[in-house]
Image (tube, helix red, strand yellow):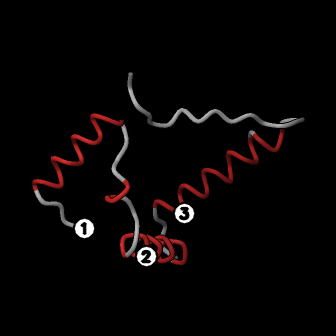
Amino acid sequence: MTFTPEDLDHIAAHLAATGEIDARYSYMGEGAATWDRFVTWQEGDAVPNILHSTLSMLHDAHHDLVARLPGPVRVVDLGPGQVA
């Protein structure tokens, strides 16, 4: 996807006003299909890549940390959000 200067101005204004990316610029339509092809390619690739590394790290973290806990686990998502 290529952005025009007007698109970039709109993205910046919307982000400043709401703290979110406008949905029209997300992975929808062909962007979603392209991302799916990319991830599927990474998943099946025999060469180590960032997806393989991430999945390996999550597997290790599960076995080293989560599997040892005796009960339910609470997860706190501290992901990006709007700054007040």
**Residue labelled with disc 3:** 52
Residue at 43% x, 76% y is: 33
Nearer to the camera, 67 or 29 = 29
- Residue type pointed to by label 3: His
SS state under label 2: helix
Residue that sits furthest to the right in the current view:
70
Please give the residue where the numbered disc 2 appears in the rendered image: 33
Q: Tell me: 42 left or right of 64.
A: left
- Give the quarter of the figure containing the C terminus: top left
Labels 3 and 2: the sequence-earlier one? 2
Residue under the point 24% across and 48% down: 11
Q: Where 54 falls versus 13 (above or below)?
A: below
Give the mark, 1 or 3, whose residue is nearer the N terminus: 1
Q: Which residue is mark 1?
A: 1
Look at label 2 and name its amino acid. Ala
Q: Secondary structure at mark 1?
A: loop
